[in-house]
Image (cartoon, rainbow, N blue to C red):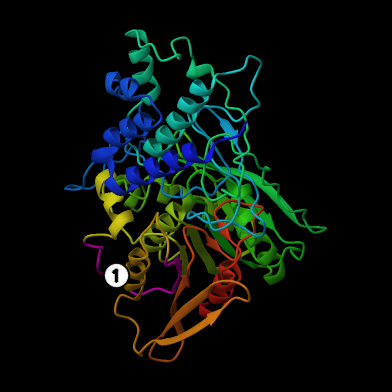
Amino acid sequence: MKLNHPMFAQIRAATLRLIDKGPSAATAAIQQALAELGLRDAAAAAPATPAPAAPAMRDINPPPAGAPAARQGDTIELNDGGAHAAKVGGGARREAPQAKAGGRDGNGNASGAAQGSPQAGAHDAAGGGSTPGQDAVAHATAVAQDMLNRMGIPVDIQASINAGMQAGMQNGLKNFDMKNFEMPKFDLGGDFSGLDLPGQQGSKATPAPLPPGAKFISGSYANHAGSRNYKLYIPSSYHGQAMPLLVMLHGCTQDPDDFAAGTQMNQVAEEMQCLVVYPEQTRSANNSRCWNWFNAIDQQRGQGEPSLIAGIAQQVIEEYPVNERQVYVAGLSAGGAMAVIVGTLYPELFAAVGVHSGLPFASAQGLPSALTAMKRGAKAPHQGGASRPIIVFHGDRDAVVNPRNGEQVMAQGLGGGAAEAPSVQSGSVPNGHRYTQTTHNQADGSLLAEHWVVHGAGHAWSGGSASGSYTDHKGPDASREMMRFFKTVS
């Protein structure tokens, strides 16, 4: 079916209002969005009914004294600017159209695969046609519900609408069962690939063919905090010799295959002879598969997700001859925030940290402070600790994680360790983005940190491939620059 442009504009406007106003105005924004589609009575009659909260990951060790306890349902989808392919809701998956070239970022600059709504599947419609009014409310409700889920707001729009229907609303939707409705794929009638809408057509990201002799194998690790699966890339050049190891932490809604495809880190590792392991977040720990960087229990050494990620690295080290002085951790968005945490808590394990569109250590202790940090930067970033080698990438048009967070990550990483004035150089990618690279050196002239600001880029992996989500091919190659940095500092 065709989505007419006036309705498209209304949905987009309502969604942007929801982002700008924040969680406190979410309900009003939803009601206004439905009203603009001629469903004012439905919005007014619908009481807010909390949705069942996703179970939070539990740890047998309590948070330290004075630290806020992690609360069930305190989950937030960080890496979600509308440019990904992901499983959501009850395992439903949907896909987005490919852009004319390259990847796409969270601001809609290019293409990738997109996320589905928890209220609607991504399959073809199964029999029986629907009316224009049903299609309109389905799309509007799905977009609004998706945004609420991304911000961790426990409001079930469908339950509210159903309650209104049961009260006798006469709007032509009385017998409409959205819970069992299968969202049809539709044509937007234009190049609107930057907007993440339920049912958008696209192709599933597929892993690149492996070079002869290379392997991309699955594994798992468990400790007192739970268990996590992972995938390990072994380059074709591996024949039992010691190699560096890079831990790559995906963003929200992503998985190891998607992250590997988008970042192309396996291809870089093949060239530079490096093992790469991709831990996988579970839906039971976070409904959007985000690493729980904002929970107090997941900011402690030996507890929660940091212990699991460090444990995965240790397990690979025990099973393969890894050069233990060349173990690194990097991540995107929520994964970038967790990379900072893991690198800070386990400095003896990780020689350097790479952060793309992430946040500083202990920048939040719960959902409200997480939303604030994402939008404005951390209010009072954690200070202290020795300096450590770190490389940071951030788009200066990132509307999901404020670029100020990149500056704060750098300040934390430096820790007063840079002895020389930084050097600043600018450049540009042919037919792509401009960038500013700031380099910090230690007293002996050795490299300590790099901060790359990609001008015009949003919430996406710089220089990535459209075969994965959250990528922007117009930026400098973050994967190659990170690997070069890691090799240099170690």
Residue at position x 53%, y 23% in the image = 132
Does the magenta run of residues contain 386? yes
Tell me residue 152's x, y (percent).
34, 38
The N terminus lies in which quarter of the figure?
Answer: top right
Place of residue 416 in the rendered image (x, y in percent of width and height, measured from the top left) = 29, 79
Residue placed most toward the observer, 181 or 385: 181
Q: Give the amino acid at mark 1.
A: Gly
How many discs appear? 1
User: Residue at left 34%, top 64%?
Assistant: 405
**Neighbour class for label 1 at 10 Å: few (<14), some, many (≥20)?**
few
Rendered position, 87 above or below 133: below
**Above or below 38: residue 256:** below
Q: Is residue 139 visible?
A: yes
Of residues 30 and 232, which is closer to you in this image? 30
Residue designated by label 1: 385
Side of 248 relative to 33 (left or right): right
Q: Which residues are magenta?
A: 380-396
Give the percent coordinates (x, y) of residue 34. 37, 29
